Image (cartoon, rainbow, N blue to C red):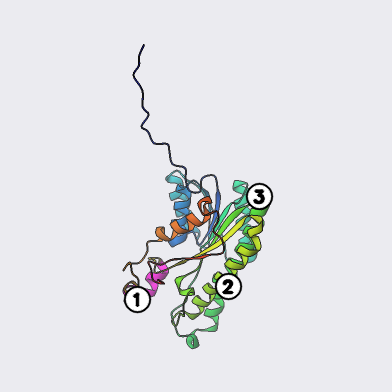
Amino acid sequence: MNNAQTTDTSTPAAVGLLAGKVAFITGAGRGIGAAAARLFAREGARVLLAARTQDQLKAATEEIRAAGGTAEYAVCDLADGASVRAAVDRTVDLYGRLDVAFNNAATSVPPAPMDQVPEADFDHVYAVNLKGPWLAMSAEVAAIRATAGTGAIVNNSSVGSLMGNPMLPAYGAMKRAVNSLTESAAITYGPEGIRVNAIAPGTTLTEMVRAWNDRSPGVIDQLNARTPLRRAADPDEIAQAAAWLLSDRASYVTGTVLPVDGGMQA
C-alpha cells in the first residue's frame, strides 16, 4: 500500500472582476475609454466599444481580440439620442444583455476665462459632456432593466467638477452637473438594483490633457506640483477604479463620486 500523500500546491485560477458581464463603454477609441475596454475584457467582460472614431475603435477592438478578449464596436455620436440608443441596442443584439456601462466620452475646448468662452464652445461641451451621459444613462437603464435586470453604471466626471475651474469653466460646470445626474440616478434606480456612481479623475495622461499642455506649456507640471503623489495618472489607473465600481465587489456602493486624483482634493 502506498501511503505517500499528494499535495496539490497549485493556485486556483483567479476569477475576473467582471467575469460573465457585458459592458458598454463610450469614448472607447482612445485614452481612458480604450484602457477601460482592454481592462474590462481582461477581467472577463464581453465589451462593446462606442465612439465617433471608427479607425481608433477598430484598432482597439482588434487589440482586445488579439489578447483573447471578446469585443465589438459601434460608431456612435454621444450627442445624438438615436445614435446612443442604437449603440446600446447593438450591445444587446450581439451579447443578449447589458450588465454594466462606463460613460467615459467627453470633449474639451481651449482653456479660457468664462467671459471669453465662445457660445458655440459652451454648447458643444454641453452636448457631449452633459447631454451625452444623460442620453446614455437613459438607454443603459432601459437595456439593463430589460435584460440583466440589475447592474451598474459609472460616469466619468473630473476632479475639476469638485472645485472652481477658472480656465475650464464650461467643462467644470458640465462635469459637476454629471455628478448631480449620477446622484439622482442612484436614488431613482437603486430600488431596482441598478447602482450608479461616478469617478473624478485628476491629471491623466490622455490626448486631451497632452493637448492642453501643448497649448499651455508646463500645465502638467503645475498640476503635478499640486498632487501629493507628484505625478499624473496613467489611463489604466483610472480604468481600474471604474472596473471596481462596476463589479460585484462594490455591491453596496451607489451615488458616490469617487476622486481618483493622486490626493489632489485631500
Q: Is residue 117 above or below residue 133?
A: below
Q: Quadrant of the N terminus?
A: top left
Query: Is residue 213 a member of the stretch shown in magenta?
Result: yes
Residue assigned mark 1: 219
Q: Residue at x 51, y 57 (%)?
A: 245
| Marks 1 and 2, the one that precedes in the sequence | 2
Disc 2 vs disc 3: Cβ atoms closer than 8 Å?
A: no
Mark 3 surroundings: few (<14), some (14-19) or many (≥20) residues within 10 A: some
Looking at the picture, which amino acid does disc 2 mark? Answer: Ala
Mark 1 surroundings: few (<14), some (14-19) or many (≥20) residues within 10 A: some
Pick the residue in front: 95 or 99: 99
Q: Residue at x 39, y 74 (%)?
A: 212
Q: Is residue 220 above or below residue 90?
A: below
Residue assigned mark 3: 147
Looking at the picture, which amino acid does disc 3 mark? Answer: Thr
The Cα–Cα distance between marks 1 and 3, rounded to whole angstroms, is: 45 Å
| Marks 1 and 3, the one that precedes in the sequence | 3
The Cα–Cα distance between marks 1 and 2, rounded to whole angstroms, is: 26 Å
| Marks 2 and 3, the one that precedes in the sequence | 2
Secondary structure found at label 2: helix
Outermost residue on the bottom side: it is 115
Pick the residue in front: 55 or 124: 124
**Which disc number belongs to residue 127?**
2
The Cα–Cα distance between marks 2 and 3, rounded to whole angstroms, is: 28 Å
Q: Is residue 213 above or below residue 142?
A: below
Outermost residue on the top side: it is 1
The residue segment tinted magenta is: 207-222
Secondary structure found at label 3: loop
Query: Is residue 90 a member of the stretch shown in magenta?
Result: no
Looking at the picture, which amino acid does disc 1 mark? Answer: Val
Mark 2 surroundings: few (<14), some (14-19) or many (≥20) residues within 10 A: some
The nearer-to-camera label among 2 and 3 is 3
